Image: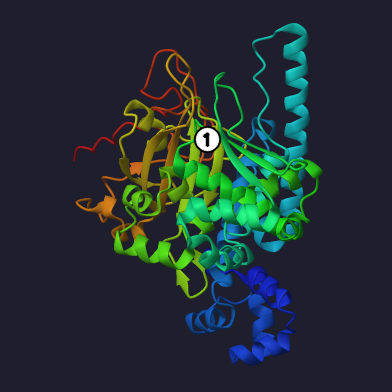
Amino acid sequence: MARKTLVGPRIRRLRKRHGLSQAELASRLEISPSYLNLIEHNQRALTVPVLLKLSQLFGDEVQALATDDQRLTTELSEVFGDMLFDGDGVTRDEVDDAVQTSPVFARAVLKLYRAFRDQRDRARELAERRHGDSEFAPPSIRGPTEEVSDFIQAAKNHFPKIETAAEDWGDELDSGGLGGGLRTALSARFGVETEVVSDDSGHAPMRRYDPKKRRLLLSESLAPRSRNFQLAHQLGLLAHGDLFDDLVAELSTPEARALGRVALANAFAGAVLMPYEPFLDAAEAMRYDVERLGHRFRTSFEQVCHRLTTLSRRGHKGVPFHMIRVDIAGNISKRFSGSGIQFARFGGACPRWNVFSSFLQPGFIQTQLSQMDNGDRFFCIARTIRREGGGYGRAQTRFALGLGCGIEHASKLVYADGVDLRDGVAAEPIGTTCRLCERIECSQRAFPPMQQGFTVDENVRHTSFFAAEPAPPKRRRRR
């Protein structure tokens, strides 16, 4: 029986999420309760007619649940890929079984591992500070940032209430241009006066709000498009702070909730500058040309890319994108996966990704047809971006931004013109992280795969240190 058809626990979770008994769901699926019970316990395969009826009943939740399970499987596999577990022999199939059978248990293991990593990182940092031991790496950025990232991922980066709130301001902000409308709204509704201030030192904040004096100060270093974004951000905090508080109430710490409010205010600002329906219509007409969309809506490359990942409104969806932002050292500061691609959570990302090579050609858009080691293929673009501010003689901060989608959506993108999307040979082989990727022969491999040992032969050196010696060809017997 094919492994992918054994999705009984997912069906059971969907049923319980909607408060249905086995008898009620079986009636809607036009099967017997006993047959549904067998499906839920993986004793019967899920047939195509039943799957179609499930899709009609639950819509995108069926695929979303499968994607969530796949992401959880990858993250838990990454946990057991830690060298801490070397020799224990935990396989990917066993991890997948644990996720499907008890995702709550799987998330608890993931939570425990994160806590272990946090403590290990703190111990390493302390040792480095006390002894200056270069053996210890600096700690990873975890805690509130990771929790908020998971919060956004769980919401599929789409917040309907925020979209509605932004649309309600449409007519009021249109008068006098967007920037003028935002300033007028802040002044008329909240008594906030806006001022653009000089930045002689080069280190002044881009935005500073004084709640007592009701003054909003914006740096002259900000381009007009970024000033509008900061104006909309402040409007969101003042007008919809209660909504933001409700949405982030599930986060565990004050720091995470504060960071979550900032993320939601940014989402509100993006929705104000790039209203959902006009933006999606323009994106489809321009075939997702990021730079042209930026010209149309007077927004930056990064703002457009981020907005493209939020277009998940039921009945009017855009291409499901993933997005990642990295610095030149490879640190991931922003990530979201709407395409189903899996990002590394606890180790380094795959260096074969074009988001890293884009630093070699700053400002140019690079395209890449890529294939994961499980066979999933994606089409990605990448470009460097420069943070605003600074001046002559001051350090420039650069990031690389990657945007991509599943191969089935790639033809909708102008960047895929001239690319043979059916050519599997031309696809760049990439992985989630070295410990999970089984391409033992990869020349850029930094660590051995989780499930494969390696033999060191001092007399042989392959392109990859971990590559295995190929078996000699069999000799034919002479008759």
Left or right, 114 with respect to 452, comes to right
Left or right, 70 with respect to 114, comes to left
Residue underneath mark 1: 449
Question: What is the total number of numbered labels drawn onto the structure image?
Answer: 1
In the rendered image, is residue 8 in sight? yes
Residue 374 percent location from the top left of the image: 45, 50
The structure residue drawn at horizontal position 68% and vertical position 25%, both measured from the top left corner, is: 139
The structure residue drawn at horizontal position 34% and vertical position 49%, both measured from the top left corner, is: 295
The structure residue drawn at horizontal position 55% and vertical position 53%, both measured from the top left corner, is: 182
Task: Tell me: residue 313, above or below residue 293.
Answer: below
For the rendered model, the colour scheme is rainbow
- Asked which quadrant contains residue 236, the reply is bottom right
**In this view of the protein, which residue sits in the foreground, 102 or 184?**
184
Q: Residues within 10 Å of mark 1 (few under 14, many from 20)?
A: some
In what quadrant of the picture does the C terminus appear? top left
Q: Amino acid at mark 1?
A: Pro
- SS at mark 1? loop
In the rendered image, is residue 96 in sight? no
**In this view of the protein, which residue sits in the foreground, 64 or 393?**
393
